[in-house]
Image (cartoon, grey):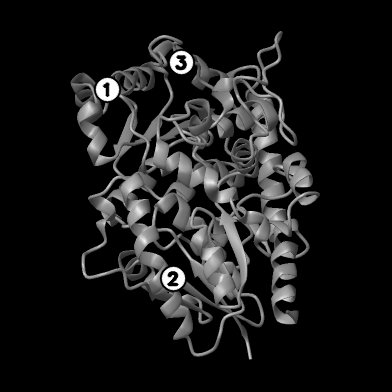
């Protein structure tokens, strides 16, 4: 009989996409079947992927009579609602399965799932979708190992903490740098470490070469630390799973996608800048105008993803020049980001440095101009610029917090054509090779998943 694993996905895109990819990978391991549990809204969007993965099933949690309130509540409010409604439903779902699962893998923010696993006699494994470095920062803050205003070097002003490189305050996650700004989200991310030492395994969306110093430190102190990433579709990485061409959550506008890819096809190799700030980050009106002005005058073709909710912030003259064809760029409301990043025309990615976007750029070998906004993005941007040396970070005005159009253009120019451009491209290409190797047989992430499966079978 095959070993069953139940996985709990928290239905925020930045957290659910990596969990879905892990579910696909795990279901393709010999002797394993996977049940992925989530809200009915997300389950319905994922239902089509099971035809390609016979050992993967999608199960909808019964979360009351009301419709999924994801679009009507803040992230804080939604998190509270999910934590209240999900535990009894997940318990019932597990009890009703045709045979008892061996392990529960859960989003690391849902710490109640560990207690539920123990009540049901299951092994438990939190999955941390952020970087290992960010996870370690949160752990240090939770355990009072890192006190940001007391541990700075007097001369350099840099912070030092076990397992991490020296960092400025501006390199820390916003929840740490500005305690109290997002109280419920702070609680959500910091409490991930309340009971993690009691879990049987720890999964991280990274790979050994990318964060080897942090991972080495963690492995010496934490139980069964396993990097299993990058959790992106296989056909953009190792090409081991031929059906794995997308996350399975995207709502396609086929006409827009085709127009976007045709536009890229018309561009020269390594000539074009891709600009996107993910599904949540919102720029201020002033920052939007500075960015538009920079793109208009940087002399580089650009593809810019502007969500419908952000379009009103675009300067009118910029929109007019786009429509007339004189701006040298294209704006879309959505595009298949991995397909864009892997396109021969893309030379650089202007990004907020969310972890999923960062991993996609790393896996595609594309240098990054980083303009982090909040959450873990400042730390990811610091690694991009200072540790991996695959990009450059824009510098906001210390008073207004706005990055000027001149500053943006300077960074784009440096990443595309400057003295450091060749080094950035070379480092990015090397990391791409390492990312793909990690997921192939014998690679660190592949071996870690095999080790996990062996432990389950022999438990």
Q: CA distance from mark 2 to mark 3?
A: 41 Å
Front tag of 2 and 3? 2
Q: Residues within 10 Å of mark 3 (few under 14, many from 20)?
A: some
Tag 1's secondary structure?
helix
Q: Which residue is identified by label 2? A: 37
Residue 152 visible within the image: yes
Sequence-wise first label, 3 or 1: 1
Give residue 402's quadrant in the image. Answer: top left
Give the residue displayed 75% in from the left and 80% down from the top: 458
Q: Nearer the viewer, residue 300 or 18?
A: 18
What numbered label is drawn on residue 443?
Answer: none
Percent x, y of residue 217? 78, 43
- Residue 332 is left or right of residue 401, and the answer is left
Residue 48 visible within the image: no
Tag 2's secondary structure?
strand
Q: Which residue is identified by label 1? A: 285
Front tag of 1 and 2? 2
Q: CA distance from mark 1 to mark 2?
A: 39 Å
Say if 285 sits above or below 103 in the image.
above
Q: Which residue is identified by label 3? A: 396
Sequence-wise first label, 2 or 3: 2
Give the residue displayed 40% in from the left and 75% down from the top: 59
């Amino acid at each position: 009989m095959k070993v069953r694993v139940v996985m709990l996905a928290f239905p925020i895109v930045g957290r659910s996409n990596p969990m879905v990819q892990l579910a696909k990978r795990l279901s393709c391991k010999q002797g394993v079947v996977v049940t992925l549990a989530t809200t009915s809204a997300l389950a319905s969007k994922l239902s089509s992927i099971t035809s390609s993965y016979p050992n993967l099933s999608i199960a909808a949690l019964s979360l009351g009579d009301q419709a999924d309130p994801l679009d009507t509540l803040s992230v804080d409010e939604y998190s509270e609602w999910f934590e209240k409604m999900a535990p009894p439903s997940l318990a019932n779902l597990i009890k009703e399965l045709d045979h008892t699962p061996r392990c529960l893998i859960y989003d690391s923010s849902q710490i109640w799932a560990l207690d539920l696993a123990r009540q049901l006699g299951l092994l438990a494994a939190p999955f941390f979708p952020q970087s290992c470095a960010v996870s370690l920062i949160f752990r240090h803050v939770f355990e009072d190992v890192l006190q940001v205003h007391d541990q700075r070097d007097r001369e350099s002003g840099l912070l030092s903490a076990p397992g991490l490189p020296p960092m400025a305050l501006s390199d820390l996650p916003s929840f740490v740098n500005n305690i109290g700004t997002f109280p419920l989200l702070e609680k959500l991310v910091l409490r991930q470490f309340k009971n993690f030492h009691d879990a049987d395994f720890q999964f991280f969306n990274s790979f050994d070469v990318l964060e080897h110093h942090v991972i080495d430190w963690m492995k010496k102190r934490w139980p069964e630390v396993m990097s299993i990433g990058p959790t992106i579709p296989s056909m953009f990485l190792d090409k081991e799973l031929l059906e794995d061409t997308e996350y399975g959550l995207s709502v396609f506008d086929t006409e827009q996608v085709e127009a976007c890819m045709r536009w890229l096809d018309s561009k020269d190799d390594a000539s074009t800048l891709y600009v996107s700030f993910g599904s949540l980050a919102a720029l201020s009106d002033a920052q939007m105008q500075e960015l538009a002005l920079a793109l208009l005058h940087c002399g580089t073709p650009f593809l810019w993803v502007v969500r419908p909710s952000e379009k009103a912030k675009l300067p009118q003259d910029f929109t007019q020049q786009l429509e007339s064809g004189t701006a040298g760029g294209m704006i879309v409301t959505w595009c298949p980001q991995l397909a864009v990043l892997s396109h021969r025309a893309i030379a650089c990615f202007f990004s907020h440095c969310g972890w999923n976007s960062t991993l996609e750029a790393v896996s595609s070998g594309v240098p990054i101009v980083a303009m982090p906004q909040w959450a873990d993005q400042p730390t990811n941007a610091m690694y991009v610029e200072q540790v991996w040396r695959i990009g450059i970070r824009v510098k906001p005005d210390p008073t207004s917090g706005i990055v000027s159009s001149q500053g943006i253009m300077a960074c784009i120019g440096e990443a595309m054509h400057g003295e450091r451009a060749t080094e950035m491209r070379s480092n990015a290409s090397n990391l791409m090779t390492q990312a793909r190797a990690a997921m192939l047989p014998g690679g660190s992430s592949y071996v870690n998943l095999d080790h996990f499966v062996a432990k389950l079978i022999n438990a």
